[in-house]
Amino acid sequence: MTQGEEERVVFLVADGGMQQMLEGYLGRDYAHRGLGCGPFDFDPIDDVVVAPHRDPDVYGRHRGLLSLYQETHQRAIVMIDEDWEGTPGADAITTHIERGMRQDWEAGSFAVIVLKPELESWLWQENNPNIARELKVPSDYRQILEKSGHWPADRRKPARPKEALEHMKKHHGADQSNAAFRRLAGCISVRGCIDPAFTLLRDTLCAWYPETTYS
């Protein structure tokens, strides 16, 4: 095996939107440079598992969904929204999944990332022309969402990012497709994303694939 093959990471995600977002972020050329880490293999087909029944499936069946990948991957990242029907909350989600993962994966070889409250929080950045272009919304989307009450002036992100996107779709024709997520993730600034869940993803990859280790 090559070194890259020995250190493959599998991503368990809750839905196709997360899958497309990862493909947009990690599938771009030299993605590791934007993240500030060393290079690593990423294949959106072989390295991403989409839970059949979304977030509750990730919460309840993460061990089973990842079991086959223990033979081919040495690291795993579990991604799940905090906001779904029946959710016990972010802390309880993290504790439950980490407990399950420890039964099958070595310490330090996995990470649990809870998106608060949901994936759409990764989309929104202030004054970014790529967002208007890829979501097909007016360039003053920030002001529109502030006026509608979805994005208060003193916040760097909408409080309910999915509702903000739904508002833009209903009133301004925003593209909510998974493909839009991929396109947007492929062109917006990785370093400009301040979401704590994304920061955890980036920091985890940097720890596993340090820039100083690979040239």
Image (tube, rainbow, N blue to C red):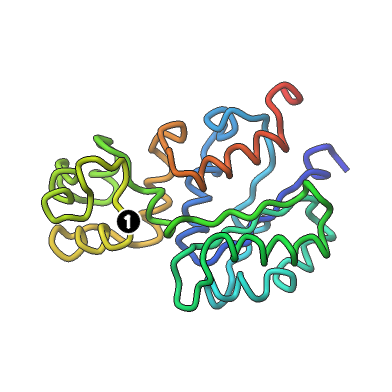
Q: For mark 1, what is the residue?
A: 161
Vertical relation: 67 (above or below) 85: above
Residue 158 rendering spot, x and y as whole percentages: 29, 51
Observer-nearest residue: 183 or 145? 145
Q: Is residue 155 left or right of residue 61?
A: left
Residue 116 rendering spot, x and y as whole percentages: 45, 56
Q: Is residue 23 left or right of residue 5?
A: left
Corner quadrant of residue 205:
top right
Q: Is residue 152 left or right of residue 192?
A: left
Secondary structure at badge 1 equals helix
Please state the total of marks drawn on the protein image.
1
The local crowd at label 1, few if under 14, some if 14 to 19, many if 20 or more residues have their Cα within 10 Å, is many
Q: Quadrant of the C terminus?
A: top right
Residue 27 rendering spot, x and y as whole percentages: 54, 44
Vertical relation: 207 (above or below) 195: above
Residue 190 rendering spot, x and y as whole percentages: 46, 35
Vertical relation: 65 (above or below) 172: below
The residue shown at (83%, 63%) is 104
The residue shown at (49%, 62%) is 81
Corner quadrant of residue 92:
bottom right
Q: Amino acid at mark 1?
A: Pro
Looking at the image, which residue sits at the far right?
1
Q: Quadrant of the N terminus?
A: top right
Observer-nearest residue: 159 or 166? 159
The residue shown at (16%, 41%) is 139
